[in-house]
Image (tube, coloured by chain):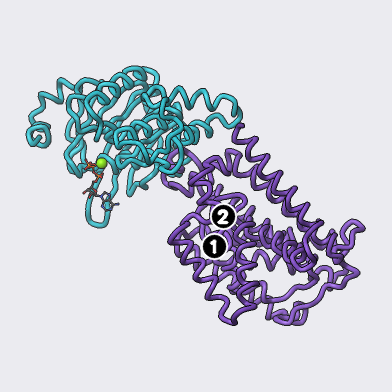
Chain colours: A cyan, B purple
């Protein structure tokens, strides 16, 4: 599509008319979305708003019923997930998805190795750096299943870091984290800000208001509002649909 | 000791032990062990797919048989030398596993089991259909004169044992390298959590396809050697029963362990050997062994050792 090819060059990711229905249910409808490079973008909305479905279509886990996705200026709508990932996306699952019977080290190594295929000597160093950034380095040789739920979430984030993505998609990363872990998580996001573009689905409003440069609100599969944290905070529609109900 | 070194000592030691046994075992057990080593190679191939990649095939007999007939028919009807015949057996298994992989991997889970079962059943019927050449169930004997590899007469028990051991050692080495390489680790990742592996950017289909090809080719190589070393090719090796055997051996020995297939094949071979001397209902003992295993050593014999004592075992 010509319009997609000519997106502003500073947009890392763009969607046009992106839609998905499950049987009769319109989970995502006609979403036009632009994500500039380097931004920390929060994607919020009530339960069932279509957030997970939307990002699933970005990274290729879920196929789109209609519409287009462009990444790094190229149309990736028809690419399978692994090809999108290898072009620089990383995705962490809302429902923790790790290699439970493998060590933390091997979990992260799997994330690192694909990128460093020609440089096996660099793998261990990068694995340890990713683990240390989420505070799990001292547990590197434990089996992932033995970790607490919160630590498993952090492990999954470390797997995202290990991929050194251009775009990191985090689906409710702070769910199940203790307050101190949330504080560490915020620092982690800050440390990446500017280098990595982050798309963050998040229910914790403190995290959203503090971390996001820009917010997109999804409701019933459609974009309800977009704006800075202040604008979203003040938006009456958003309050009615979402914040007010909290 | 590093894990790599431990693994080297263990597997090197195993080969040395098998070599030693080749000189000291009485004839009966000597012959059995030669057979078990080739069957273990069959199971090692199966294990690449089932144990490491997590794909359960019910049709591996077709690969074993493809190797066996690729070898046997070319000797019998085309006058190939043993070397050329072995190669044609390996190539036959390679081609078959490529085609079966491309088709069967469109399915997953139970459908994959069924599809592989159907392919193998078709293979069996093909062997029967071309009975004029394959001699069907009755099979055919590979003449002693043809059973000479590089000047070595493999119908001689001592040579046969050493050839079986060499085959086993080479396959053991290949599989060790495979599972310790990044590629093998991706197979394990696919077994553990396919969705996560995909979302780390790995091409799941390509990895599974290579796993089917490696698995089928190793199993077929075992079939080719089995036919040549023991001088016989027959349709019974293409039956469902021969697809179930490697599954049982691998389950008994430990799925996803390098030495499990040998341990499982050896255990089952002697279990049947001993109990069939006592009763005609000897398969009952195999069944009981499996039930005990699922109750007390769910991960198989070697798998259980790994879980309890040696987490470094590849
Ligand atoms: N595979 C599926 N099959 C059928 N319906 C689905 C499927 N996945 C999602 N849905 C439905 O689509 C809608 C959007 O779901 P989605 O998971 O995208 O919402 P969400 O915004 O991520 O919600 P939450 O905040 O609870 O995670 C929901 O009504 C959900 O029930
Ligand atoms: Mg969701």
Please say if the residues under marks 2 and 1 sit with CB atoms less than 8 Å apart: yes
Say which quarter of the image contains residue A175.
Answer: top left
**Numbered disc total:** 2
Which type of secondary structure does the marked residue at label 1 adopt?
Answer: loop
Q: Chain of mark 1?
A: B
Q: CA distance from mark 2 to mark 1?
A: 8 Å
Q: Nearer the viewer, residue A133 or B17?
A: B17
Which residue has dot 2 on it? B49
Q: Considering only vertical position in the picture, is B199 above or below B109?
A: above
Quadrant the C terminus of chain B occupies = top right
Which type of secondary structure does the marked residue at label 2 adopt?
Answer: helix
Position of residue A57 measured from the top left corner of the image (x, y, whole percent): 35, 42
Say which quarter of the image contains residue B285.
Answer: bottom right
Task: Give the crowd class for mark 2: few <14, some 14-19, many >=20 residues within 10 Å.
Answer: many
Q: Residue at x 47, y 57 (%)?
A: B297
Q: Which mark is residue B57?
A: 1
Q: Considering only vertical position in the picture, is A74 above or below A39?
A: below
Using the rendered image of the protein, determine whether residue B285 is visible from the camera's viewpoint.
yes
Using the rendered image of the protein, determine whether residue B163 is visible from the camera's viewpoint.
no
Q: Earlier in the sequence, mark 2 or mark 1?
A: 2
């Amino acid at each position: 599509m010509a319009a997609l090819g000519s997106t502003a060059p500073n947009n890392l990711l763009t969607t046009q008319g992106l839609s998905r229905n499950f049987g009769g249910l319109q989970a995502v409808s006609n979403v036009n979305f632009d994500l500039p490079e380097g931004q920390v973008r929060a994607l919020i909305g009530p339960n069932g708003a279509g957030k997970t479905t939307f990002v699933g279509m970005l990274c290729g886990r879920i196929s789109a019923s209609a519409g287009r996705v462009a990444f790094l200026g190229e149309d990736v709508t028809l690419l399978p997930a692994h090809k999108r990932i290898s072009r620089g996306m990383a995705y962490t699952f809302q429902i923790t998805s790790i290699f439970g019977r493998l060590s933390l080290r091997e979990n992260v190594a799997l994330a690192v190795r694909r990128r460093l295929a020609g440089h096996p000597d660099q793998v261990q160093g990068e694995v340890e750096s990713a683990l240390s950034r989420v505070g799990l380095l001292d547990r590197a040789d434990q089996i992932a299943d033995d970790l607490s739920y919160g630590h498993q979430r952090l492990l999954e984030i470390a797997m995202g870091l290990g991929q050194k993505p251009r775009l990191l998609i985090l689906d409710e990363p702070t769910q199940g984290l203790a307050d101190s872990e949330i504080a560490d998580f915020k620092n982690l996001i800050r440390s990446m800000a500017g280098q990595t573009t982050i798309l963050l689905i998040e229910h914790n409003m403190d995290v959203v208001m503090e971390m996001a440069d820009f917010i997109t609100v999804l409701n019933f599969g459609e974009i309800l509002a977009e704006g800075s944290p202040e604008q979203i905070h003040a938006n009456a529609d958003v309050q009615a649909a979402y914040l007010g109900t909290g | 000791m590093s894990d790599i070194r431990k693994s080297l000592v263990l597997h090197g030691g195993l080969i040395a032990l098998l070599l030693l046994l080749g000189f000291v075992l009485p004839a009966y057990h000597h012959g059995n062990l030669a057979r078990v080593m080739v069957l273990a190679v069959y199971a090692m191939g199966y294990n690449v797919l089932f144990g490491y990649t997590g794909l359960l095939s019910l049709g591996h007999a077709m690969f074993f048989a493809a190797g066996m007939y690729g070898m046997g028919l070319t000797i019998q009807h085309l006058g190939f030398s043993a070397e050329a015949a072995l190669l044609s057996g390996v190539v036959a298994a390679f081609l078959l596993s490529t085609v079966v992989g491309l088709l069967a991997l469109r399915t997953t889970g139970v459908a994959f089991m069924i599809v592989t079962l159907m392919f193998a059943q078709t293979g069996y019927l093909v062997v029967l259909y071309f009975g004029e050449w394959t001699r069907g169930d009755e099979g055919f004997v590979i003449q002693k004169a043809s059973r000479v590899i590089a000047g070595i007469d493999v119908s001689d028990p001592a040579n046969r044992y050493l050839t079986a051991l060499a085959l086993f050692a080479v396959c053991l080495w290949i599989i060790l390298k495979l599972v310790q390489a990044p590629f093998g680790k991706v197979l394990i990742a696919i077994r553990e959590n396919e969705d996560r592996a995909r979302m780390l950017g790995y091409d799941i289909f390509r990895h599974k396809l290579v796993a089917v090809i490696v698995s089928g080719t190793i199993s077929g190589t075992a079939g080719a050697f089995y036919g040549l070393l023991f001088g016989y090719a027959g349709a019974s090796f293409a039956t469902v029963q021969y697809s179930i055997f490697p599954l049982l051996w691998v389950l008994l020995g430990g799925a996803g362990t390098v030495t499990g297939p040998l341990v499982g094949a050896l255990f089952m071979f002697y279990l049947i050997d001993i109990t069939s001397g006592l009763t005609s209902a000897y398969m009952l003992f195999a069944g009981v062994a499996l039930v005990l295993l699922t109750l007390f050593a769910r991960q198989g014999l070697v798998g259980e050792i790994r879980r309890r004592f040696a987490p470094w075992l590849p």
